[in-house]
Image (cartoon, rainbow, N blue to C red):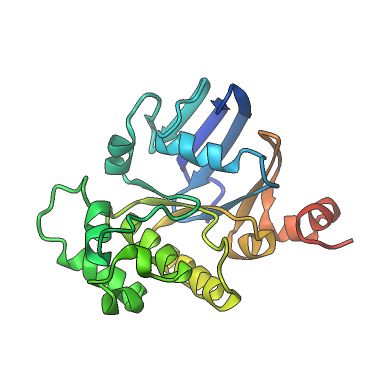
Amino acid sequence: MSADAPAMLALDGVHAVYGKKIRALKGVSLEVRAGEVVALIGNNGAGKTTMMKTIAGLLKPEKGNILFQGRDLAGLPPHRIMRMGLSLVPEGRHIFPRLSVMENLEMGAFSRAEKDLSREYEHVFHLFPVLGKRRAQLGGTLSGGEQQMLAMGRALMAAPKLLMLDEPSMGLAPVVVDKIFEIIELINKEGVTVLLVEQNAKRALRAASRAYVLETGEIVAARDTAALLKDAAVQKAYLGLN
């Protein structure tokens, strides 16, 4: 990806308050260019989820600008942002447990104007064959890995240009984590830009071409992932290496 490519998503000096006036973001600036996989790593409480929610319109920035394909997202409700081509797979999945797999996927396409979604269903079942086999099963009865696949499939039903993934490997068995990251790579090869928040920093850095390090609401490093993997401070803080 050329460094001269225009930013699909750009944050400039974004501040955000979360919960009981906790200042979670303190002037965050970053960009994601079309076609990239960009990772955001940081310890628990660094503000990663707050940033994702702020971009998606679930939280309003206190100040700063968020531009998606040159359009300002400030003040837009989440469904408008999704309709523009930006989808979020939230931390903890948040599927609808009492709805079937098919009904969960249908909810992901609520903002679409098209009535025939057969191509989108076919695409999701191609990526996640197990969902095709369980299409009539209630979401709450799926395994953790299957629920994560369903959350990702639901987001893809909106035909996003940029997919934001918040902790997709959390609580999953290693073999399922491998599958999830294979799908992230495949989705990106199909042309979907990805912003990835991931506690497993080593997997995130290997999956992405660039990454940002967030500490207590501030970006403290922004480099190619190859450089970050070799950075002694990053190795010690996030990769468990001394």
Residue 106 horizontal side relative to residue 49, left or right: left
Where is residue 144 shown, x and y percent of the image? 47, 67
Residue lying furthest right: 242
Where is residue 125 shown, x and y percent of the image? 29, 73
Question: In which quadrant of the rendered image does the C terminus lie?
Answer: bottom right
Number of marks present in the image shown: 0
Where is residue 179 shown, x and y percent of the image? 50, 75
- Residue at image location 62% in from the left, 60% down from the top: 204
Where is residue 93 shown, x and y percent of the image? 44, 55
Residue 20 horizontal side relative to residue 125, left or right: right
The front one of 242 and 147 is 147
Answer above or below: position of 178 versus 69.
Answer: below
Residue lying furthest left: 115
Residue 200 horizontal side relative to residue 109, left or right: right
The front one of 81 and 149 is 149
- Residue at image location 47% in from the left, 65% down from the top: 184
Answer above or below: position of 194 versus 150.
Answer: above
- Residue at image location 69% in from the left, 49% down from the top: 223
Answer above or below: position of 94 versus 14.
Answer: below
Q: Quadrant of residue 48?
A: top right
